[in-house]
Amino acid sequence: MALFLFTLIASYKGVINSWDFISNLSVLDYFLIGLLVSLIGLYLWIWLQTGYKIEKDELYIKSGPFRKTIKIEHIHKLRTSKISFMALSPFSGPALSTELMEVTYGKHDEVINISPINKKEFVKVLVAENTEIHDHTNI
């Protein structure tokens, strides 16, 4: 998308390899460039700041500016799943891998996808904290 926006602005101005390109920008161009830089920053923030921590009977999930805390006692089920690389999006959930772990929790069986690095140890710790978790991970 970033490349598309840059190409769109550059082709609109008709000049790509010239300093005149910068001096001839309109307010809309500056807005689109600002949007582009913001989206790239958000993607980097999510990519570099995604993690999971189990502490004090809670699962803490952090993905860029997004935070989620789940009480381990509310987790019902763990299940592994896979998605294609093309379907992977930082906005679909706090998981940076195509090999996901679905965590089902809460009264309404909410599901969140995560991708801890050491899935086996992660499952072991969660099940040790809450023995009523149905482990369907086959890890």
Image: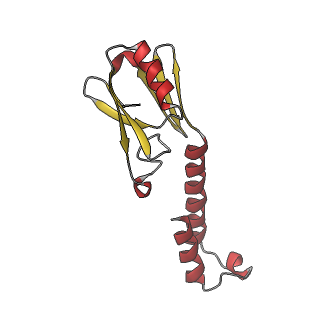
What residue appears at the point 56 percent right and 76 percent down from the top-left corner? 7
What residue appears at the point 26 percent right and 23 percent down from the top-left corner? 107
Q: Residue furthest front?
A: 138
Q: Residue furthest right?
A: 19
Q: Residue furthest bottom?
A: 14
What x and y, as percent, mark residue 49? 59, 39
What x and y, as percent, mark residue 2? 55, 65
Considering only vertical position in the picture, is 136 above or below 57? Answer: below
Q: How is the image coloured?
A: secondary structure
On the picture, is 87 further left or further right than 66?
left
What x and y, as percent, mark residue 110? 30, 31
What x and y, as percent, mark residue 23? 71, 77
Image quarter (top left, top right, bottom left or bottom right) of the C terminus: top left
Nearer-the-camera pick, 31 or 55: 55
Nearer-the-camera pick, 26 or 74: 74
What residue appears at the point 43 percent right and 13 percent down from the top-left corner? 129
Considering only vertical position in the picture, is 27 above or below 60? Answer: below
Considering only vertical position in the picture, is 50 above or below 12? Answer: above
What residue appears at the point 60 percent right and 86 percent down from the top-left corner? 14
Considering only vertical position in the picture, is 101 above or below 13? Answer: above
